[in-house]
Image (cartoon, rainbow, N blue to C red):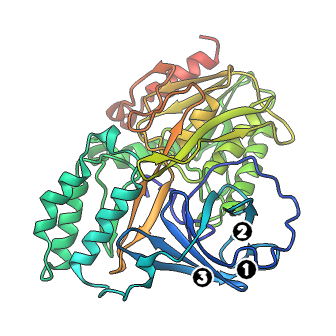
Amino acid sequence: MSRLSRGLSLALFVAVTACGDDDDEHRPPLGGALEGSWVTEGYGYTLRFDGDEVELYELTTVSCLSLSDGDVEEDGNAPGLGLRFTRDGERLVIENGLTLHITAQHTERPEVCTRAKPPKKDPEVNFEVFWHTFAEQYALFGLYGVDWQSRYDTFRPRVTAATTDDELFTVLSEMLEPLKDGHIRLEAGEHVFLPKPAPAWLATHRESVKAYVRAHYLSGPGVTLTAQERVAYQSLDAHVGYIFLAGMAGFTGDGTDEAADVEAASRAIDEALATLADKDALIIDLRFNGGGYDAASLAIASRFTDREQVAFTKKARVGDGYTPSREFRFAPVGARRFTKPVYLLTSNLTASAAEIFVMAMSALPHVTVVGERTDGAHSDVLSRQLPNGWSFGLSNELYTAPDGHVYEKVGLPPDVEVPLDAPALAEGTDRIFQEARRLASGG
């Protein structure tokens, strides 16, 4: 995918990919402390514990869809789900050992979960679940200037019991049209709708730009490829090194194991820095990085700081407000760290977790961003399903950069602005790289 959405990961639960500040201390036996039903604060889930089993459901005011189930050990770990459950006072804390942190409150089982299940293929039911999920979870209506109730009033009359799958897909796609959010996706078998259009140049220059990048940055004398070709590095001259980061997931293969990906990303950046440690400056290329895991981004960023730093804060939508903001930090890690000048190359294809890397690195005094504004898709993707089996994703969180600004939708600005000139690049002139090379060489 050209834009790797941070969707379902270890837990088959919810995509929350960021480094928290929780430790891995021993968890005492819970002794039935989780028994009963819980509803998450934000994220739209309900959980039901019965002895050593847990069931997870996607929840709206009109639906309760079974998502997954598994066994829970005495210490709260659920290995089959990749989750662990603990109590924090009256709250349930849901984690995945790396990045996920969601809280829930004990409650009676939601009434909607006790109703008879409607027909899965009913187009009106599927429309209602889709609309209510966005109405209750989507965090960015204000940023995009969309009145979601008016979208309901416009499109609901077009859906009846006789509506076909193709017609329903068209209605849902048209309803999403004004939300030009790179983290919104609707999938129905082979049909995929993304409301945010790709840059226009991709239609004419995609293959030639790919060929240039592969020939110059991913192959040739002196280039080392590692971590399933997600990382490439080389010495440009005696003073400047270059690292290409193709994504923030897939370092071990398919990218479904977040923990393994973070470990592999850490090994790859350590390998690159061991080779390039004597350089006076580094260029790190993120222009074609569509994202992945925030945890991988922060693991890599940890090799470029000599003290603990705030990477970002975020909060999730709850009703008409948000959960309390949660701060995410990164600190020095690894055998060596590079704190000499670093030049990050960005474009409007730099998206999602790649932007989180830029957000974290931009706070460091020795880092300069060269290129274009990034894509502007920061929230983790809340991945959901419809009764008919279709899937979709939406943004339910609001990220704030260390400078206190929200760059969702608008993207992170560069320090040195150089547009990505695709026609020139296709013909062999890489203006962004040239400017970074000039700066890195003391220009």
Above or below, 369 relative to 27: above
Write down the residue under mark 2.
Answer: 85
Disc 3 from disc 1: Cα separation: 10 Å
Q: Which class describes the residues within 10 Å of circle 2: few (<14), some (14-19), or many (20+)?
A: many
Q: Can residue 216 be seen in this view?
A: no
* Residue lying at the far front of the rendered structure: 108
Q: In this view, does 159 lie above or below 374?
A: below
**Dot 3 and dot 1 residues touching (CB under 8 Å):** no
Q: How many marks?
A: 3
Residue drawn at x 23%, y 52% as measured from the top left:
177
Q: Are marks 3 and 2 in contact (CB under 8 Å)?
A: no
Residue that label 3 marks? 69
Q: Is mark 3 on a helix, strand or loop?
A: strand
Q: Position of residue 99 (x, y in %)?
A: 67, 55
Task: Report the residue at 60% width, 27% height from top.
Answer: 362
Label 2's element?
Answer: strand
Q: Are circles 2 and 1 on residues that touch, CB within 8 Å?
A: yes
Identify the residue at image location x=24%, y=47%: 147
Residue drawn at point x = 56 percent, y = 69 percent? 13
Q: Residue 42 carries which label?
A: none
The amino acid type found where label 1 is placed reads Val
* Amino acid carrying mark 2 in the image: Phe
Residue 357 location, quadrant: top right
Pick the residue in front: 14 or 31: 31
Point out the tag, 2 or 1, that comes first from the N-terminus: 1
Q: Would residue 423 appear left or right of 156 to someone viewing this image? A: right
Q: Where is residue 50 in the image (x, y as percent from the top left)?
A: 66, 85
Mark 3 or 2, nearer chain start: 3
Which residue was labeled with disc 1? 72
Task: Report if residue 111 is visible in the image.
Answer: yes
